[in-house]
Amino acid sequence: MNATMLTYIYGTPDALAKIVREYPENLLPLKNALAGKPVKRMMLLATGSSYNAALCARSYFEETFGILVDLKEPDYFTYYERIDPATSLVLAISQSGKSASTLAAMQKVQAAGLPVFCLTADPASAAAQAADGVLDLNTGIEQVGFVTRGFSATVLNLLLIALLIAESQGTVSRAAAAAERDALHTLAAALPTVIEKSEAFIRQHRAAWLAASRYVAIGYGALLGVAKEAETKLTETVRLPASGVELEAYMHGPYLEANRSHLLFFIEHQKNTRLRALRDYMRPYVSEVFTMTLESDEPAENTLSLGIPSNHPFSTLQLIVPFQLLSFHLAALRGVDLNIRIFDDFDQVLKSKV
């Protein structure tokens, strides 16, 4: 039987547990390269789901450990931006390792005399071969075009890289870093419960998913990455308009497009009064509002309360799951056969991948 999105979503808990378990060997090339070299500012090159994953992890680098991160869209960076001279580490993220724009951005960085590490699911890919060091996502190549397990694996690897850098620089003690990794392992073990709760929630609200003509996911902080990946997955699979918007940004214009055919998702870590105030205000103007949260204080019908505590960046690994599952199931409900490839010559004509 061929693998589907669902196959990879169900396999994510084991895949993430393996990544945490094997991180010392898997990230050894980076650890060796960092020996005695402080990292105060780094650059991440990423596009698509890889960019969304970096959004999920960036605050862990910056807010938790004080490592400044320049997150760059590769094509814009290649033609219109300069490299900050304080940059001491560059990491290109490409799950397939085939992104032509990422390759071009890597070449620009290398021409400036900076080495580039590549985080990828395919160590034999073009991006990996062009890199100065390769970090394997440690999940194998995802054979479905709509990545789910690979997205979560990218977030987790970035979180572990942040920990590795912080520990190598003495920003965090060895014991504290071990406790963080234990928390990630515990989170991976809890994901089957997250999947079960999410599946039940999706079944319960089947009519609401089908009634909407546009989906909007709203998040804040690291959860902006979840909102943007929700946009990506829903657009790719359901093939209806979708957007992922930062909480305050939504209040500065996008709310004006809301109408009775729109469905809004509000994504929160812990109880966020600003987010809930916006949710309650928008409720009369759209078809439905839903809240995805780790809080368990509001057992409302339209709230998916995962109720598994974790810190803000780590929570992204849980809160992406409902959107991954919804993308798969809603595509099926709407009669979209994800096994049928569309725009099959797109990469060949546009040369977006090598």
Image (tube, rainbow, N blue to C red):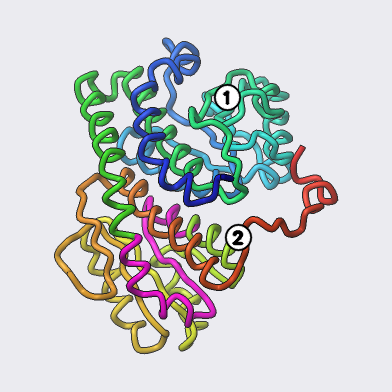
Give the residue type that dot 1 points to.
Phe
Question: Quarter holding the C terminus?
Answer: top right
What is the magenta range?
A: 199-228
Compared to 351, does 103 lie above or below? Answer: above
Nearer-the-camera pick, 261 or 332: 332
Q: CA distance from mark 2 to mark 1?
A: 29 Å
* Apparent side of residue 318 relative to residue 141 in the rendered image (left or right): left
Q: Quadrant of residue 196?
A: bottom left
Q: Quadrant of residue 189?
A: top left
Nearer-the-camera pick, 304 or 28: 304
Q: Residue at x 21, y 62 (%)?
A: 271
* Apparent side of residue 322 relative to residue 178 in the rendered image (left or right): right
Secondary structure, mark 2, is helix
Image position, residue 261 (x, y; %): 49, 85
Q: Residue at x 43, y 36 (%)?
A: 68
Image position, residue 40 (x, y; %): 43, 28
Q: Residue at x 47, y 71 (%)?
A: 216
Compared to 141, does 6 lie above or below? Answer: below
Question: Quarter holding the N terminus?
Answer: top right
Image position, residue 206 (x, y; %): 40, 75
Q: Is residue 215 magenta?
A: yes
Q: Quadrant of residue 134?
A: top right
The residue identified by callout 1 is 117
In this rendering, the label closer to the viewer, 2 or 1: 2
Q: Which mark is residue 236?
A: 2
Give the residue type that dot 2 points to.
Glu
